[in-house]
Image (spheres, rainbow, N blue to C red):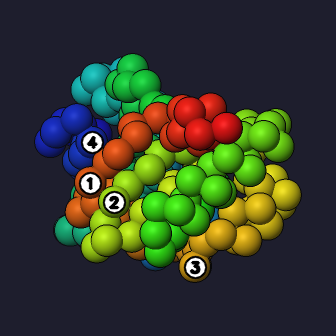
Amino acid sequence: MNIELIDENKVLIDLCDDDMERLCIEYATLDSRKNTPVIKTLIEIAKAKAGLTTYPHTKILVDTMPYDGGCFILITLQHPPLLNGKKFRILKKSFARIFVFANSNDMIQAMEKIFCYGHLHCQSYLYLYREHYYLLIESLSGIEKVTIHLLNEYACRNFSQTIKIAHVKEHGTIIVAKNAIEILGSSFS
C-alpha cells in the first residue's frame, strides 16, 4: 500500500491485489455503501501515515481507477467552511415609515399633536425633499397604531417601502437629525 498526500484535502492510495485481499475489497463493489467502513479505515491510515486532517461533518468523495494488479483510490475531503474567529452581528429588524406633509403648517400641527400625546418609543427624523416635508419614524418594536393614525390626519401620504425610504434619506435634506418629534413638538406646543 502506497499513500501519497497530494494536498491538504486529497490523498492518493495505491492498493495492490494483496492489500485489497487483506482489506476484503473487491474493485467491482468498491463504490457501494458496504465499503464505507473500509474507506474510513483507509482515511485513518492516511491520517496516521501522511498527515491528512479531517473535521466533523467533512464530506468524502472517493474516485477509483483499476490497473493490472490493483487500483488507485483518490480520496477528496470537502471541509465545511470555518469561521476562523470572525464575529458576526445579528441585525434586528426595524420598522420604518415615512409620512409626507404638503406644507409646514400640517407638519407642525402633526408634531404638536404627537408630542402632546406622548408615549413615543421610536426615533424620528425630518427631511425636506422636493418641497415636501418627510417625517421618518423608526422603531425596533413597531410603531404604535395611535401614532400612525394621528400622523395620517395631517400627512398627505405615507409609505414603508425600504427602497423609497432609502431614496429620501439619500436625496433629501435633513432638517432634524434625531428626535424630530420631541424637538419640534416641544418648540411649538
3D distance between C-alphas at marks 4 and 2? 58 Å
Disc 1 designates what residue? 173
Instruction: Residue under label 2, please give it.
Output: 128
In the rendered view, does 16 fall on the left or right side of 136? left
Which residue position is annotated with label 4? 9
Q: Is 4 drawn above or below residue 157 in the view shown?
A: above
Q: Which label sits in the foreground, 4 or 3? A: 3
81 and 121: which is toward the camera? 121
- Displayed quadrant of residue 107: bottom right
Quadrant assignment for the C terminus: top right
Q: Residue at x 69, y 63 (%)?
A: 151
Q: Name the amino acid type tagged 1.
A: Thr
Q: Residue at x 47, y 74 (%)?
A: 102
Secondary structure of the residue carrying tag 4 is loop
Q: For residue 134, which numbered disc appears in the image?
A: none
Q: Residues within 10 Å of mark 1 (few under 14, many from 20)?
A: some
Which amino acid lies under the numbered mark 3 shown in the image of this protein? Cys
Q: Earlier in the sequence, mark 2 or mark 3?
A: 2
Q: Amino acid at mark 4?
A: Asn
Of the two numbered discs 4 and 3 on the same chain, state the one appearing first in sequence. Answer: 4
Q: CA distance from mark 2 to mark 3?
A: 15 Å
Q: Secondary structure at mark 2?
A: strand
Spatial separation of the CA atoms under disc 1 and disc 4: 55 Å
Question: Residue 21 at what x, y percent from top left?
Answer: 46, 52
Give the CA distance from mark 3 to mark 1. Answer: 19 Å
Say whether marks 3 and 1 touch (CB < 8 Å). Answer: no
Q: Is residue 28 left or right of residue 141?
A: left
Amino acid tagged 2: Leu
